Amino acid sequence: MNIPFNKPFIAGKELYYIAQAVTYGNIAGDGHFTEKCAGLFEERFGIAKVLMTPSCTAALEMAALLCDFQPGDEVILPSYTFVSTASAFVREGAKPVFVDIRPDTLNMDESLIEAAITERTRAIVPVHYAGVGCEMDRIMEIAERHDLLVIEDAAQGVNACYKGKALGSIGHLGCFSFHETKNYICGEGGALCINDEQFIGRAEIIRDKGTNRQRFFRGEVDKYTWIDVGSSYVPSELCAAFLYGQLELLDAIAERRREIFDRYVRLLKPLAEEGLLELPQIPDDCQSNYHMFYIVLPSHDVRDRLMAHLRSEEITAVFHYVPLHSSPMGRQLGGGRQSLPQTDALSARLLRLPFYHGIERHEMQRVSDAITEKLHEDRSAATGDGGKRTVIADA
């Protein structure tokens, strides 16, 4: 009866393609399926060059290397994000400057970016939370006016759009994730999206351990050698084979996630109308990929009590990021001195619900019933009026 938070899935020919990769005789990397995945993204999303990587962290680290930071340079990003968004740039000597988030989308508040810019600012890193795009027109306009780079952290944004443009295809660089918790998975995997063609040549070198091996394979040089910094940022061909089996079903998987998201909205909307929780918001100019479903509770205590109740019902729901500015490393870098009221408040009240490709209707009903029961119980205890219980049955 346990309902997990996430469950990996097979949608199509993933296992067949893994066997095919072995038959082709190249399982190390940059084989048939790596090329197929990259080509699909380039064509489908209009990206100049896509380089597949072992993780989104690896893609972010490549992006940071391409920025060529100098000690003391600054990068503007939200605190409400995964650690890799900041650590990739910190390891290259840059200092993170955290900006608060919007209460509607939980994305970086674009109206606060300009005030955070100094003479040391070199880049802006918008994070597309939950597969909902940041306000990229405003961000790109600010970046152009101040001569800054924009690196999209689109780890959660594969196959989502902002004003018809694919997330990851708008900034100078973009980064995807195919971790097992994402919409399209291969266990661990990522991609660097290069939209400014000036970065392509060096990105290939960085990805291949600092060598010009790709030029050698294309016959452009008679031998390859070490010419720049770099690392091993090439993914296993087996991971790419599994991923391609999912990318062939890009739209079908997206539609399935939309169905799950919409069903949660229908089940939980009565609680939102009662003021017991808040539901996710998607602006009209954003096409979400429905990466997750979260609810925002009235307080930290209510969130934690509900999470414990769900656990007692064998339902795994989790909070999300601990804001980076409040982490030990974030405080060491000076982030703890920043005032980020929306980040602090929303991170303490947010709860992510079970969301995966194979979740069944009756399981979602169980989640909804358990949430309804607990929130009505809490309200009854607070008001002493006995409360009223509303259950919306799944159609």
Image: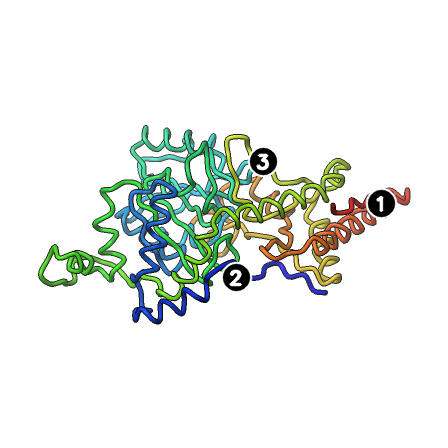
Could you tell me the amino acid type at mark 1? Arg
Q: Residue at x 29, y 61 (%)?
A: 30
Q: Is residue 130 visible?
A: yes
Circle 2 Cα neighbour tier, 10 Å, few/some/many (<14 / 14–19 / ≥20) = some
| Mark 3 Cα-neighbour bin, 10 Å: few <14, some 14–19, many ≥20 | few
Q: Nearer the viewer, residue 221 or 305?
A: 221
Horizontal arrangement in the rendering, residue 330 relative to residue 280 (left or right): left
* Residue at screen point 67% across, 56% down: 360
Q: Which residue is mark 1?
A: 389
Residue 268 falls left or right of residue 238: right
Please name the residue that numbered disc 3 is placed on: 104
Q: Give the quarter of the figure containing the N terminus.
A: bottom right
Q: SS at mark 1?
A: loop
Q: Which quarter of the figure is the C terminus placed in?
A: top right
Query: Is residue 90 shown to the viewer in this render?
Result: no
**How was the colour assigned to the protein in this rendering?**
rainbow
Ranked by sequence position, the earlier of labels 1 and 3 is 3
From what the image shows, is residue 107 above or below residue 284? below
Q: Position of residue 296 (x, y in %)?
A: 66, 44
The residue under label 2 is 10
Q: Position of residue 288 (x, y in %)?
A: 52, 40
Q: Considering depth in this image, is 210 or 87 the residue closer to the camera? A: 210
In the picture provided, is 246 more to the left or to the right than 119?
right
Q: Are marks 2 and 1 in contact (CB under 8 Å)?
A: no
Residue 19 picture quarter: bottom left
Residue type at tag 2: Ile
Q: Amino acid at mark 3?
A: Asp
The number of numbered discs placed on residues in the rendered structure image is: 3
Q: In x, y percent, where is residue 289?
A: 52, 44
Residue at image point 29% right, 43% down: 48
Select label 2 or label 1 by which is in front.
Answer: 2
